[in-house]
Image: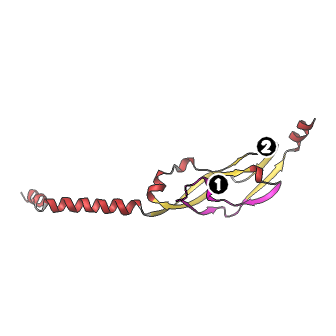
Amino acid sequence: MKLKSLLTNNAPLKIVSCIVGYTFWFIFGHSQTITTQVTVPLCFYGASDSTQIQAPDTVQIELNGKRSIMQSLDLSNLAVHVDARELVAGTQPIELSQKSLFLPESIKLVHYTPAQILVTVKQNEQSTEQTVA
């Protein structure tokens, strides 16, 4: 009998309290800003067949954004995209930006590791000689 009276006393107040608590949790939980770290592949596009690119396979990035937007982002399909046509022969550092990750404006790229991504570009001379001959 005590359990039944404990549950039924002030039942409307308990129901309203649960609804208000859930509402606050939902509102503040989804607008909360979170930070997450993800390891993503480094992908080059636009390179000719005679171009050889040496670079790290993956980059660890740190993203910051609202919880609801971060949960809707498919992190497994995220990659760093670099236009190889803009690279020159030799070793050079490349800068990552939100544009190279194709991120929504509401998600910010906070940090990436390694801090300086070095890329070495070489032109394959054999392919060049074969196309000329």
Residue 59 visible to the viewer? no
Residue nearer the viewer, 46 or 7: 46
CA distance for labels 2 and 1: 20 Å
In the figure, is residue 14 to the left or right of 26?
left
Characterize the local packing of mark 2: few (<14), some (14-19) or many (20 or more) Cα atoms within 10 angstroms.
few
Nearer the N terminus, badge 2 or badge 1?
A: 2
Residue 67 at x, y percent in the picture: 45, 59
At x 32%, y 63%, the residue is: 24
Residue 54 at x, y percent in the picture: 76, 51
Quadrant for the N terminus in the image: bottom left
Q: Helix or strand or loop: what does disc 1 sit on? A: helix
> Residue extending furthest top?
133
Residue nearer the viewer, 23 or 35: 23
Q: Is residue 46 magenta?
A: no
Disc 2 + disc 1, Cβ < 8 Å: no
Residue assigned mark 1? 100
Instruction: Please name the colour scheme applied to the rendered image.
Output: secondary structure
Residue nearer the viewer, 32 or 76: 32
Quadrant of res 90: bottom right
Amino acid at the residue labelled 2: Ser
Quadrant of res 49: top right
Characterize the local packing of mark 1: few (<14), some (14-19) or many (20 or more) Cα atoms within 10 angstroms.
some
Q: Is residue 93 magenta?
A: yes
Residue 58 at x, y percent in the picture: 65, 53
Q: Helix or strand or loop: what does disc 2 sit on? A: loop
Amino acid at the residue labelled 1: Ser
Residue assigned mark 2? 48
In the figure, is residue 5 to the left or right of 83?
left
User: What segment carries the magenta color?
Assistant: 89-117
At x 57%, y 54%, the residue is: 103
Disc assigned to residue 132: none
